[in-house]
Amino acid sequence: MSSTLLRTTPILRGALRASGAVKPASATFVRGKATLPDLPYDYGALEPHISAKIMELHHSKHHQTYVNGLNSALDTIGEAESKGDFTKAASIAPLLNFHGGGHLNHTLFWENLAPASRDGGGEPDGSLKKAIETDFGSFDSFRKQMNTSLAGIQGSGWAWLVKDKSSGNLGLVTRANQDPVTGQFVPLLGIDAWEHAYYLQYENRKAEYFDAIWNVINWKTVAQRFEKP
Amino acid sequence: MVNIGNIWQYLALQSPLQSLSGDQLNATKMAVTTYTLPQLPYAYDALEPYISSQIMELHHSKHHQAYVTNLNKALESHLAAVAGTDIAGQIALQQAIKFNGGGHINHSLFWQNLAPAGSEEASPSAAKELVSAIEKTWGDFEAFKKAFSAALLGIQGSGWGWLVKDGPQGGLRIVTTKDQDPVVGGEVPVFGVDMWEHAYYLQYLNGKAAYVDNIWNVINWKTAEDRFLGSREDAFSVLKAAL
Ligand SMILES: [Fe+2]
Ligand SMILES: [Fe+2]
């Protein structure tokens, strides 16, 4: 995943790791740029559940803005580092978290959606289905709990189905704004609860969006993330 | 307006209440206040073309109404938790009260600090004292607008930008708050701008910089001047009037 998020050649990645130690102060900070990933389907492919206009703005404008913001945060940090100005570099941390998180979250989101006519909707099967039933009682109960989490977000944010790295158990977490899922959790399924994700179609009726999105969840992707050791 | 019917129904379900005396119960009921949606001081289309009629209608009649409704619900539940000496229940409700109460306060202040473009109130000349304090603080009025706009555009996620006065004799300051956190320190809120996406998305889409540029056409400088010259109590009088 990280290789598609931040395209760097192995050599550059090596340079990136070593840069703090060996680079002379005047050197340019060389590294890869984050780029906007292509959607794995057309903008109109999630209709009628998510409109083409929402998808186009969401991908080509909002996600692009996070990509640009991430690159500019990395540039600023690189410049500051090359001047030995670590106070300045540290001050960029909130921007890195926000734009880096926005890039990561949206990339995961596009991949865990699919047209209802293709892989979208329905219910998971196999080991993921079993795990959901064990940890949430039933698929229906899981869906209700996730919708409750989504509805409870106060402001902008995301809800995630996650796997606990140490116990292997499934759980639900919410994240404010673009805070990414990190640490002990592996993100399996994310739903964007920012107003830009639904407002043009659903306006203030966000519960309708949270109901409709289940028709376009790509359970194959979620299962792959779940099964990855 | 006291919504006794609902409260009574709710309280009747709480068994510990049966040990309360009639007087205690009566005092509890009287303490409930039901907040209501304040009317806009102008028509939904009055801020066109800078804020569309559709945005204003949804924002006021749906979003603000939801904060009022959920604030009342949270306060009812809180009252029941107090009456039932359920401290954990009271603590659990703090966030809902803060969020929905903040949403009610912020939007009530916001509607009052907007005015139709071209009206007398919408001109900074309606705020002589405030503008002179702004010029003293930021050098000139344009520099202030630039700083305020930058603060608005720097908000990550949902939130608000406010010009505040620090207490009765205090200086001016720009603050941003997240989600519906209200300006509830000692500051006097002079004016605020809603930076939630629902405040502009139907008209400006992802172009929030254009919304921020245009909001300056509909700031109510008369209201801002009154709040600047008055006390915190004065600024919040609109909320009291809405009870
Ligand atoms: Fe988004
Ligand atoms: Fe709002």
Image (tube, grey):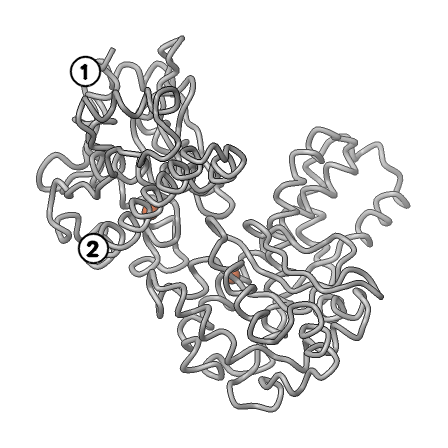
Would you place residue B25 above or below residue A174 in this image?
A: below
Q: Residue at x 84, y 32 (%)?
A: B19
Mark 2 belongs to which amino acid? Glu
Q: Is A186 in front, or is A119? A: A186
Q: Where is residue B95 in the image (x, y as percent from the top left)?
A: 63, 41
Q: Residue at x 12, y 34 (%)?
A: A119
Q: Residue at x 79, y 51 (%)?
A: B29
- Classify the position of the C terminus of chain A by image quarter: top left
Asked which secondary structure carries label 2, the reply is helix
Ligand 1 lies under 8 Å from the Cβ of mark 1:
no
Please tell me which of labels 2 and 1 falls first in the chain: 2
Would you place residue A122 above or below residue B243 in this image?
A: above
| Count of numbered badges drawn on the protein | 2
Is A128 left, or right, of B30 in this rendering?
Answer: left
Whether callout 2 and callout 1 share a subunit is answered yes
Residue B106 seen in render: yes
Q: Is A78 in front, or is A179? A: A78
Q: Where is residue B109 in the image (x, y as percent from the top left)?
A: 64, 67
Would you place residue B35 above or below residue B114 in this image?
A: above
Is A30 left, or right, of B220 in this rendering?
Answer: left
Q: Residues within 10 Å of mark 1 (few under 14, many from 20)?
A: few
The residue that mark 1 highlights is A126
Residue A150 seen in render: no
Asked which secondary structure carries label 1, the reply is helix
The residue that mark 2 highlights is A56
